[in-house]
Image (cartoon, rainbow, N blue to C red):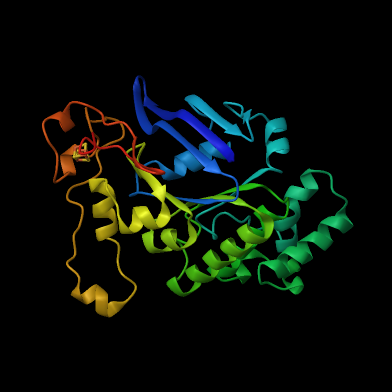
Amino acid sequence: MNLIEIKNLKKFFEISKGSFVHAVDGISIDIRQNEILGLVGESGSGKSTLGKVIAGLHGRSSGEVKYQGELLPEVYKASDFLRLSKEIQMIFQDPYSSLNPRMTVEEIIGEGLKIQGVPSAEVRKKVKEWLEKVGLQSEHMSRFPHEFSGGQRQRIGIARAMIVEPSFIVCDEPISALDVSVQAQVVNLLKELKDSFGLTLLFIAHDLSMVRYISDRIAVMYLGKIVECGDADEVFFNPQHPYSKLLIDSNPIADPQKEKLREFKSIEGEIPSPVNIPEGCRFAGRCPSASEECGKVTPQLKSIADGHEVACHLFK
Ligand code: SF4
């Protein structure tokens, strides 16, 4: 069963009269109940914008986002935020700037419940419970964000999202700003919470190995479009789109011995400007398999195997 259904979603930002950044450009994808969908791609591919549109932090330019079958508003009003924040939450990339430095941990984590009118004593009790669930202690309640490490701050961010008991969380690069040693702890915490509370997550990240580890399915995004989507192991070990292959080949291997031995392949060139979108396949200028057709015709996402879709002219 699908929790989120996205149809032909577009989000453009006008940067000057008649000139637009095509951040999300016609995406259709479903997110199933109780799954973790990993979303990967280089910086500038539109991943974070897609996450923010789904979470209602950006309005959409066109297309549909449905949550449990309900069409969500194009632009949220205050009343929509109040109602939908009980269902849909977001965990942000930077645990340093996403927590208000003037608020105590109790105020930060309890804010969502307070806005919903939950009595103070109940909020306090829940904050204590959630601090413990994310591996912190109740004596941390009266402290300020600067007194914590990056990993601890991200745990505070997770508790803030979880306390309202949402069904769906957009995790926008939640481990990118953390030390490698802490990344696995945060990913394991999210995995545990998903299993214990039947959560559904959109997990946006750069680190493909971590995305494969946490995700049930992976979607690969390039310049505003999904170019490949499928079961996490299938996409990671058997990628079919030339961009996915290069992205996975350029991902560092955690084992230093294996990393030393492997042939490193990088993706040539830069991701094109999202303002001047090239005609045809958006990856054609960097693709080792590009043909004449690729520069003219935009490939559509097609099923190549059960649950595995690719947008590439190599697959007819
Ligand atoms: Fe490469 Fe052509 Fe496939 Fe695009 S459509 S990824 S340019 S082969």
Q: Is residue 197 above or below residue 227?
A: below
User: Residue 29 or 99: which is nearer the viewer?
Assistant: 29
User: Residue 36 or 180: which is nearer the viewer?
Assistant: 36
In the picture, measured across the screen, residue 291 lies left or right of residue 29, that is left
In the picture, measured across the screen, residue 52 lies left or right of residue 306, that is right
Residue beneath the point at 36% across and 36% down: 224
Q: Quadrant of ligand 1?
A: top left
Q: Residue furthest left?
A: 292
How many numbered marks are there? 0
> Which quadrant of the rendered structure holds the C terminus?
top left
Residue beneath the point at 71% across and 43% down: 86
Residue 214 in picture, x, y percent from top left? 49, 60
Residue 12 found in image quarter: top left
Residue 106 in picture, x, y percent from top left? 75, 61
> Which quadrant of the rendered structure holds the N terminus?
top right
Q: Residue furthest top?
A: 18
Q: Is residue 89 above or below residue 253?
A: above
Q: Is residue 207 above or below residue 90?
A: below
Q: Residue furthest front?
A: 306
Residue 62 in picture, x, y percent from top left? 48, 23
Residue 272 in picture, x, y percent from top left? 24, 39
In the picture, measured across the screen, residue 161 lies left or right of residue 27, that is right
Residue 57 visible somewhere in the drawing: no
Residue beneath the point at 63% across and 31% down: 69
